[in-house]
Amino acid sequence: NAGVMQNPRHLVRRRGQEARLRCSPMKGHSHVYWYRQLPEEGLKFMVYLQKENIIDESGMPKERFSAEFPKEGPSILRIQQVVRGDSAAYFCASSPGAANEQFFGPGTRLTVL
Amino acid sequence: DQQVKQNSPSLSVQEGRISILNCDYTNSMFDYFLWYKKYPAEGPTFLISISSIKDKNEDGRFTVFLNKSAKHLSLHIVPSQPGDSAVYFCAARRMNRDDKIIFGKGTRLHILP
C-alpha cells in the first residue's frame, strides 16, 4: 500500500520559469492538502482540495499560484513566473475524509536560481 | 498571528531520560491536537493525537497531555531513544470541519548518547 507520492523530489528553476509539483494521494484518499515549509519555519497551509474541487485556498498567494485535483491523475501545484522567495519545501498530504489525520508525502524541494 | 506556538526551537535530552516537548495555542475553537515527527528530507509522520474531550492519551513511549484551561499541550517521550532525534511539530485543527491543520514551527529534539 503505497503512501503519498510526490514528484519530483527536487526541482530547480530559474526566475520567471514555471514549476509544476505533483502529488498522488494514498489509495482511497480523496482529500489533498498542500503545505509549504520555508527555512526555519513550520509548515504553512496553502490549499485543500477534493476531487475536482478547491475547498479552501486561503493560504495560497493570489497571484502566480494555482492548484488542481482532477478526476483522474495526481494533484498539481503550479507556480508561474517563480521568484527566489518561492524556494521552499512543498509537502502534500492526503486523508480519506476531512476529519481524519493527514498523511504526508516526502515533499518537493524547489530551488529558484 | 501564530495560533500554535512551540517556543523552544531545540531541546537536548540524555538517552533513557524523559523528553518533554511543549506547545501552546491561542484559538479556543481548536478541538483536536496532533503531534508529527519529521526527519530531514522526509515528510512529517503522524505520531499521536488527542481530542479536547480528553486530557491524556498514551501510545507506548509517547504520551500527550492537554490542559484546555491553559491552552497548553505537551508530548512526553520516555525513555528517549536515539531514533527519537527529529523535529517535532505540534498541530491543531477543528474536528468535523473542512479545516486545515495549523502547525507550530517545530522543536528539534537531540537525544544525546
Image (cartoon, rainbow, N blue to C red):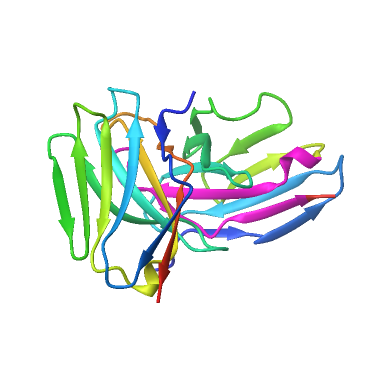
Image coords of residue B73 (percent x, y): 26, 40
| Residue B100 in view | no
The verdict on residue B78 being magenta is no
Observer-nearest of A48 and B69: B69
Horizontally, residue B97 falls left or right of residue B66, namely right
Observer-nearest of B86 and A87: B86
Which residue is farthest bottom? B113
| Figure check: A54 above or below A90 | above
| Residue B7 in view | yes
The verdict on residue A94 being magenta is yes
Horizontally, residue A97 falls left or right of residue A64, namely left
Say which residue appears at 37% left-offset and 44% top-offset.
B90
Say which residue appears at 31% left-offset and 28% top-offset.
B97
| Figure check: A60 above or below A83 | above
Image coords of residue A91 (percent x, y): 55, 50
Say which residue appears at 34% left-offset and 30% top-offset.
B25
- On the image, which quarter does residue B66 sit in? top left
> In the rendered image, which quarter contains the N terminus of chain A?
bottom left
Image coords of residue B64 (percent x, y): 22, 49
Q: Which region is colored magenta? A: A84-111
Image coords of residue B21 (percent x, y): 33, 50
- On the image, which quarter does residue A86 sit in? top right
